[in-house]
Image (tube, rainbow, N blue to C red):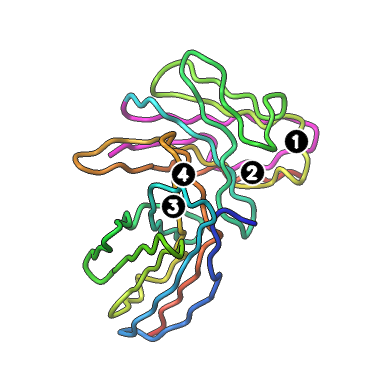
């Protein structure tokens, strides 16, 4: 299994500012993902964080708004830029881990962001 | 059309009851299927994978119908601790990206 921590756990930010969320994993993993969960909704994949190359973004998400870093196999950051109230959401990082006979995605505890 | 659709519920059931709910997926090329559980204000956690032949894990039974493109979850002998939102999750390709349903809320009452 993989143990994932995220910082900060929550924040309240003013519109127009940016917030960087950190994700730390206790083991080296190839695949890291960033998801968003808006209030009352399910998870939506933002991007795949690739080590050594640019992140791969899903439709509707762009690098200028959500820049991602992946400096090594245990760490990634997601920045929410030029925030607006619509960015209020929970942001979760996730890793894919091959267990013995099973494949599972593990999620961090999430960062609860409120933009005022 | 959403890739994964679920009945949002809520399903309110007494302890000991059986509750079952489905989810449908739109992409016939989907390869892997899962049920995740999400407690209030917590991250999703894998409940069980869903295999073609159907599978059971204790009180939980999952079924997959590829022809009709739906997945089901049945919970027997419901416990208070089963109260949660159950997320139907599908992986389409080999890239490990997951598509999530909006979740089915189950509340088990004493």
Q: Nearer the viewer, mark 4 or mark 3?
A: 4
Q: Residue at x 61, y 30 (%)?
A: A57
Contact? badges 3 and 2 (CB < 8 Å)? no
Magenta span contains residue A9: yes
Q: Residues within 10 Å of mark 4 (few under 14, many from 20)?
A: some
Give me the C-alpha separation between circle 1 and circle 3: 25 Å
Q: Which mark is residue A83?
A: 1
Kindly indicate whether the residue at mark 3 contacts the one at mark 4 (C-beta within 8 angstroms). no
Image coords of residue A60 (percent x, y): 70, 38
Which residue is tagged 2? A113
Residue at which label 4 appears: B92
Q: Are marks 1 and 3 on the same chain?
A: no
Q: Is residue B6 above or below residue A29?
A: below
Residue annotated with mark 3 = B44
Tell me where the magenta segment starts and ends, as one range.
A1-27
Compare residues A14 and B90 and report the one nearer the observer.
B90
Residue A54 falls in which quadrant of the image? top right
**Badge 1 vs badge 2, beta-carbon distance below 8 Å:** yes
Q: Chain of mark 3?
A: B
Measured from the top left, where is residue A98 in percent x and y? 28, 36
Q: Is residue A47 above or below residue B51?
A: above
Tell me if A31 is positioned left or right of A41 in this view.
left
């Amino acid at each position: 299994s993989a143990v994932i921590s995220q910082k900060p756990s929550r924040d309240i930010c003013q519109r127009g500012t940016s917030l960087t969320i950190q994700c730390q994993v206790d083991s080296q993993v190839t695949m890291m993902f960033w998801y968003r969960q808006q209030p009352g909704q399910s998870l939506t994949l933002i991007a795949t964080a690739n080590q050594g190359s640019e992140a791969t973004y899903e439709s509707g998400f762009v690098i200028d708004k959500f820049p991602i870093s992946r400096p090594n196999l245990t760490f990634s950051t997601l920045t929410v830029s030029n925030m607006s109230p619509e960015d209020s959401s929970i942001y979760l990082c996730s890793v894919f881990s091959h267990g013995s006979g099973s494949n599972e995605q593990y999620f961090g505890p999430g960062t609860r962001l409120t933009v005022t | 059309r959403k890739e994964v659709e679920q009945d949002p519920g809520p399903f309110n059931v007494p302890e000991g009851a059986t509750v079952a709910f489905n989810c449908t997926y739109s992409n016939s090329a989907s390869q892997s299927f899962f049920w995740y559980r999400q407690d209030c204000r917590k991250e999703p956690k894998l409940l069980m994978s869903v295999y073609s032949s159907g599978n059971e894990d204790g009180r939980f039974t999952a079924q997959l119908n590829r022809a009709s493109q739906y997945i089901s979850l049945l919970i027997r002998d419901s416990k208070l601790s089963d109260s949660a939102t159950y997320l139907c999750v599908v992986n389409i390709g080999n890239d490990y990206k997951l598509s999530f349903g909006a979740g089915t809320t189950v509340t088990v009452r004493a």
